Amino acid sequence: MPIDRFLPILLLVGSNIFMTFAWYGHLKYRSAPLLLVILASWGIAFFEYLLQVPANRLGSTVYSAPQLKGMQEVITLLVFAGFSTWYLGQPLKWNHWAGFALIVVAALLIFKE
């Protein structure tokens, strides 16, 4: 896979790791004050944007905006599945996987000519 096709995907993976921590990482720390959690999430999201914006900018030279969004959704699901199991200790059940699979199928349709 040429670098112009691979780099946006790699950047999307990195950005999703940051964003998943920003959105869900605080669930492990329910006793932390909400304002502190919000500020920490914003700080983490800053690093997500440092990867997300270049991913979309570079990716738009080889992918359409809908294709980038479809990739984003599939990557988000994969990152979240690992995060939920590894970090939160909440493995996905069959119905979660089935629902995610339907989203993956929908994202794949975006690449159909």
Image (spheres, rainbow, N blue to C red):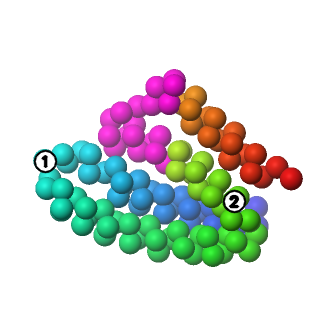
Q: Gap in Å between the C-alphas at discs 1 and 2?
A: 39 Å
Q: Which residue is mark 1?
A: 31
Q: Name the mark on residue 89.
A: none
Residue pictured at 61% horizontal, 70% vertical: 56
Measured from the top left, where is residue 24 in percent x and y? 34, 49
**Magenta stretch: includes residue 84:** yes
Quadrant hosting residue 71: bottom right
Q: Nearer the viewer, residue 7 or 68?
A: 68
CB under 8 Å between discs 1 and 2: no
Q: Amino acid at mark 1?
A: Ser
- Can residue 29 be seen here? The reply is yes
Q: Nearer the viewer, residue 20 or 3?
A: 20
Q: Is residue 84 above or below residue 40?
A: above
The magenta segment: 79-96
Q: Is residue 40 above or below residue 27?
A: below
Quadrant hosting residue 10: bottom right
Total count of labels: 2
As helix, strand or loop, the secondary structure at mark 1 comes to loop
Residue pictured at 63% horizontal, 76% vertical: 57
Q: Which residue is mark 2?
A: 66
Q: Mark 2: few, some, or many residues within 10 Å (few <14, many ≥20)?
A: few
Residue 42 lies left or right of residue 2; in this view the side is left
Residue 86 lies left or right of residue 51; in this view the side is left
